[in-house]
Image (cartoon, rainbow, N blue to C red):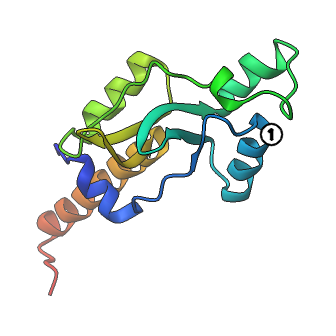
Amino acid sequence: MDTPVQQLLKRKGTFVLRTAPTASVYESIQRMVDHNLGSIVVMEGEALAGIFTERDYLRRIVLQGRTSRTTAVAEVMTTDLVTATSDTTVETCLSLMTEARCRHLPVVEGDRLIGLVSIGDCVKHLLDSAQAQVHSLQNYVTGRYPA
């Protein structure tokens, strides 16, 4: 089942919500809400500068008494990023996210951001694969083969 992330990205797409480091936290949160996403990647030009997540908001804005309208996302984003490449397996991505206690993993090729996978994306992929295997085994055992 060692599926590379590039296959997952082909199915889910490579759209990544992005913002500049100078954007306010409020603007970033608004964009996350508009897209129904739990994170936004912070880009300095074409370079990956960090990621801002719902967890960052709770820990670095709410609990520290900051104001989201006046705080730049660069002040509160996560900069110590764990990343994957297109050939990293989905299983390895899950391990990386578990170890780093994060839920979003930027996918990079060299210095270029090519996608983002979440823990939910990886779990869904593994569940879909397991269900396909079960279906295949049921067909095998009962003698029913797809036409």
Identify which residue, 2 or 147, lies in the foreground.
2
Horizontal side of 55 relative to 139 (left or right) equals right
Question: Where does the C terminus fall, quadrant-wise?
Answer: bottom left
Q: Quadrant of residue 136?
A: bottom left
Position of 12 compared to 62: left or right?
left
Q: Position of residue 71 (x, y in %)?
A: 79, 27
- Vertical order, 135 against 121 (above or below): below
Depth order, front residue of 16/6: 16
Q: Is residue 36 left or right of residue 113?
A: right
Judging depth in this view, the residue of 129 and 80 nearest the camera is: 80
Residue 13 higher or lower than 42, as above or below:
below
Q: Residue at x 31, y 55 (%)?
A: 8
x, y percent for residue 88: 21, 38
Q: Residue type at mark 1?
A: Tyr
Instruction: Name the side, left or right, on which 53 lies relative to 66.
Output: left
Q: Residues within 10 Å of mark 1 (few under 14, many from 20)?
A: some
Q: Which residue is mark 1?
A: 26
Quadrant where the N terminus is found in the figure: top left
**Residue 33, position as x, y percentages in the image:** 74, 51
Residue drawn where x is 13% and y is 78% of the image: 145
Secondary structure beneath disc 1? Answer: helix
Q: Position of residue 112 (x, y in %)?
A: 31, 45
Tell me the residue at 67%/54% (across/down).
36
